[in-house]
Amino acid sequence: MLNKIPKHKYLLALCDYVILQLSFLAAIQLRFGFELSEIPQAIWNDQVLIFALVSIAWIAVFQHFHLYKINVFLSLIPQAIAILRAVGYGVVGLIVLSFIVKGMSYFDSRLIIAYFFGAGSLNLIAFRLLVFRNLYALFAEKKLLQRKVLIVGSDRSARMVAAKLVVESSLGLNVVGFIADEAKIGERVFGDLYVIGSLNQMKDIVERENIEEIIVAASDVSHQKLIDIIDQAKQTKAVVKVASELYGIVPDKVWIEQYAEIPVIAVMENHKNVAFMLYKRVVDVTLSLIGLILLAIPFLVIAVLIKLTSKGPVFFKQIRIGKDGKPFEFYKFRSMYVNNDDSIHREFTKNLIRESKQMVVNGEGKLEVKKIVNDPRVTPIGRFLRRTSLDELPQLFNVLKGDMSLVGPRPCLPYEWEEYEDWHRRRLSVLPGCTGLWQVSGRSAVGFNDMVILDLFYIENMSPMFDLKLILKTFPVMLFSRGGY
């Protein structure tokens, strides 16, 4: 997937890296006042080499603050603010590093850190706003920097995307044409842009026209059809972005790139990266072990409360559907009375999924994913555990076993799985998680189909920083009981 990232983003990241190194050397020079002839000796100082290694992670911080997204690096005030925040976070990291590793005089020096923050921020802002931003816009206007774009669809959404890209020539995106099955080849869609082929010709058109980016903008289609189109686009060499209204829940919940104020959702397929998935598993095991150790006393307190308030075991075990539709034993703290009838939940869930499907067919609004309110099967302590999601903590054992990950789509029940359409089942093409994008996006205020879309977005765009962000956002959701019943 690295070869699908635009080259200008690599160039910008390299420039950021060099500016960080030069700014750190400038801070040392301001503090200790070495002469120009002494610079080579200063460069080979062990602490400068450590800073050079740390700066690689710093680029990930820049990525976290969206500094490589086109609508940010072409902006003024938002970009300057993002730079200050990114440099500030990195400085905090240096200070923490100085406490962990002793004897690092450069990092221990308050003056060096202060000088670096000032020099780094000013240099980055000056280069990005005065040099890179203007050069990018100039090269794009002169057509020296152009990315050929193919738009999938011919409906209102596709026309709007084309209109925006044609007007905003500084983006450097050159729309070649449209492909669609619902319109004839040669039919004019917008301005001087025409339908140049059908969907089954997509790969050939990408090769023939040397297309670098595909924007899937079709909105007057079913979710299943949209997923099929995206799958077809992923088989080409082009970068795939989604601007369909069916994915509208994503920009509502996640900060994503925009082309001339049109949200475009990347399809990166990070779940196919073997190195990342290995890293994710190592992090899962490490953090779940630490969590179980730290939560030993809370586990004991919850267990005692459960035993004192109702008869039955402390833990509740249930068969859930995991990765690729495989069943596994799922653990929770028991929040219900024993020997209860699950027909209430079974019928409620089936009806919810069926109604959601029917609303899509009829073109109606969203159906919220709700839990059963005032469920008579739930114990008094169980209501508190559910509202705060504390009943989910034993799933750390599932993570250790390899049935689940810390972050991912939630596993479903077997009778829910039976009601799923094919595109719904795609949400469990990876290990299910203890928390996920849907959980931190207002669980009970997100429609069922939108929940699936959020899960699919996470699967395609999972990353270490994304996982960390979702884990950190989970705590306030638990503490303030947002989105639960």
Image (cartoon, rainbow, N blue to C red):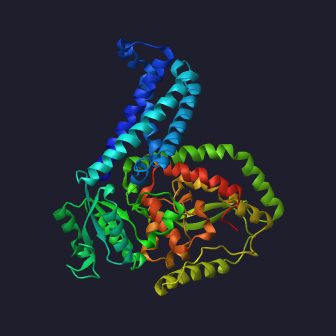
Residue at the outermost right position: 308
Is residue 277 visible from the viewing direction of this image? yes
Is residue 464 visible from the viewing direction of this image? no
The residue located at (31%, 77%) in the rendering is 154
Q: Locate residue 95, reporting x and y percent.
A: 57, 29
Q: Say which of 64 and 302 sits in front.
A: 64
Q: Locate residue 129, reporting x and y percent.
A: 41, 43
Q: Quadrant of the C terminus?
A: bottom right
The residue located at (57%, 67%) in the rendering is 319
Q: Quadrant of residue 244?
A: bottom left
- Residue 252 falls left or right of residue 193: right
Q: Locate residue 428, reporting x and y percent.
A: 47, 65
Q: Is residue 92 above or below residue 47?
A: below
- Residue 24 falls left or right of residue 241: right
Q: Quadrant of residue 35?
A: top left
Q: Say which of 185 and 482 sits in front.
A: 185
- Residue 472 falls left or right of residue 266: right
Q: Locate residue 110, reporting x and y percent.
A: 58, 23
The residue located at (60%, 50%) in the rendering is 472
